[in-house]
Image (tube, coloured by chain):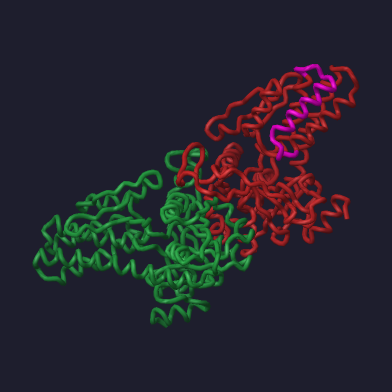
Chain colours: A green, B red
Amino acid sequence: MTVVPLRILRGECLEVLDQTLLPGEERHLALRDVAALCEAVASLRVRGAPLLGIVGAAGMAIAAERGDASDGALRAAYERIAATRPTAVELASIARLGLEAALAAGQSPAMRRAALWAFVEGHLARRMAEDLDLATRGASLLPQGCAVLTHCNTGALATGGIGTALGVIQLAWQQGKLERCYATETRPLLQGARLTMWELAKLGIPGTLLPDTAAASLIASGRVQAVITGADRIARNGDTANKVGTYGLAAVAARHGVPFYIAAPVTTIDPSCPDGAAIPIEFRPPEEVGGFGGVRWSPPHVAAYNPAFDVTPAGLISAIVTEQGVLRPPYASAIAALTGQR
Amino acid sequence: MTVVPLRILRGECLEVLDQTLLPGEERHLALRDVAALCEAVASLRVRGAPLLGIVGAAGMAIAAERGDASDGALRAAYERIAATRPTAVELASIARLGLEAALAAGQSPAMRRAALWAFVEGHLARRMAEDLDLATRGASLLPQGCAVLTHCNTGALATGGIGTALGVIQLAWQQGKLERCYATETRPLLQGARLTMWELAKLGIPGTLLPDTAAASLIASGRVQAVITGADRIARNGDTANKVGTYGLAAVAARHGVPFYIAAPVTTIDPSCPDGAAIPIEFRPPEEVGGFGGVRWSPPHVAAYNPAFDVTPAGLISAIVTEQGVLRPPYASAIAALTGQR
């Protein structure tokens, strides 16, 4: 089965799968105005950096469809969408590209609406193609009959295509190379347990869940032939920020000679960022630690250390897989060649 | 405040703190017969290897107090207690020492009862003294003004004394050397979040909770000057089995030059075990992964990889702190000297 986290219904609405209800319930929401779309983003019903880019662009199309499509109305819609989750860069940046496409289409509201729907459909199509290119390059790195370990959720629920790291895993499965995917729970928000395990089941891929604490034991046991994760930001020396917990997996994989791969689109590379120390790390509320979903298991009001990301040094990364090519160490020169920076 | 996980009421009962209700409720149970005692053990109301040793011995005293204290009755009580949790070695081994003390006390039921109560009180006193000796040796390794990271629960709730790793931390705090204790949640059973954070609050020690995924980030950040955990079994080359997740902490600590200490009584060393590969690892039910306490966050019936322990290679351990001395690498000779084996 295919995982479809959203559908663009041109001229009408954006339909999204409410990810907060997964894996218990599959409910689709029709987002018919900007208010509903912003609520869905703010409540994390739809999440994942690349997916939010599509949502941002769709929000502009919906605003033009419902409103007057004037310069002022479109700019106001853009500001409202961009402010919904300030740390989700693609939400704003792709919405802005949509705004620019609309303004460039002339003064006619009908033409602006057509340009916006065309933009969001084109953007989704490009994302899907990029995921496929990335998956093809990534799957070629995996040996026949392998099992892999992944972290967090990097599948269709995050990107709208087949995903990044989970896209590689899905393609390797379809190619008959992959026997099993191990997934960490990924505390504190449990995206691995909730979303990755759900996607694996949907796709018919044999999946095994593990507590984050068991990952080092799993790698040491020889059960996995690769570890593969996504990335949130890659510095120009190859240091990579990703969901907290990634660095520990990479450190243990290196000790056992298990390759550790990053799978991420080229847009994840930030050539303005010299190294991992320059990547800002978001700290999240202490309430996420010591409990989940209304259940608390720690004493109340405990202090918590709760960074959203950690940084994996370039030296622990066997390869960075992008839709444009597989980067190998030394990353500084590989990244400079890819991004045209020096 | 002091954490008191059990009290021996001579001639009467064993009073235990019901650990399954922590941290939400502090309820003490009076265990007045062997059936109640076995139920408390089987339901994990009382847990922790050294603490179960005390419970096993107390169970023998209670059996003699309630029953006829004949050879047959005492042997039957021993068999029943030992069978309650077959993997908890001290439960059976200390109950057996109690049985032997009773049989050696002659035929008089009164003398046997007196011998059993004396044995369990003496055993508890020895445990408390050993914890204090261990803590004194361990605290001497910590620098002034330090913060440390620990894993799982190794405090009074586990040993009946002041604990092993958490005993070291408590003493360092009392000596004014320690500023903060960081504790992992310790999935899947969350002993760090539930029990260690509760003990730290009781003792007035500043504590910070973190998801297991954030431990590598914490160590890399320079916030902790040592990592210290307990141990379940130590092979004669120093390889150490402990709560799953320990190995990953040790691997990351080594990368950052942060000392990694094991704190465990000498009885944890198994001279018959040559190395970590020879330590059997218990795998626990898949239901523990993907949920907690009646809440499930993974899809139903997922496969899980759920080992209770992992093995930290001796090469990653800066020192093994016991009540009889601090062992340093190479551990094979240090352990042989301590245990009198070669």
Residue at image coords 74%, 41%: B131
Residue A183 picture location, percent across and down: 51, 55
Quarter containing the N terminus of chain B: top right
Residue at image coords 66%, 24%: B36
Residue at image coords 21%, 53%: A34
Position of residue B213 in the picture relative to residue A16 (left or right): right
In the foreground, B207 or A2: A2
Residue at image coords 14%, 62%: A72
Q: Which residues are magenta?
A: B65-89
The quarter of the displayed image where residue B66 is located: top right
Residue B159 included in the magenta stretch of the image? no
Position of residue A324 in the picture relative to residue A7 (left or right): right
Residue B136 picture location, percent across and down: 74, 46
Most extreme residue toward the front is A176
Q: Above or below — where is B244 with respect to B199?
A: below
Q: Above or below — where is A308 with respect to B104?
A: below
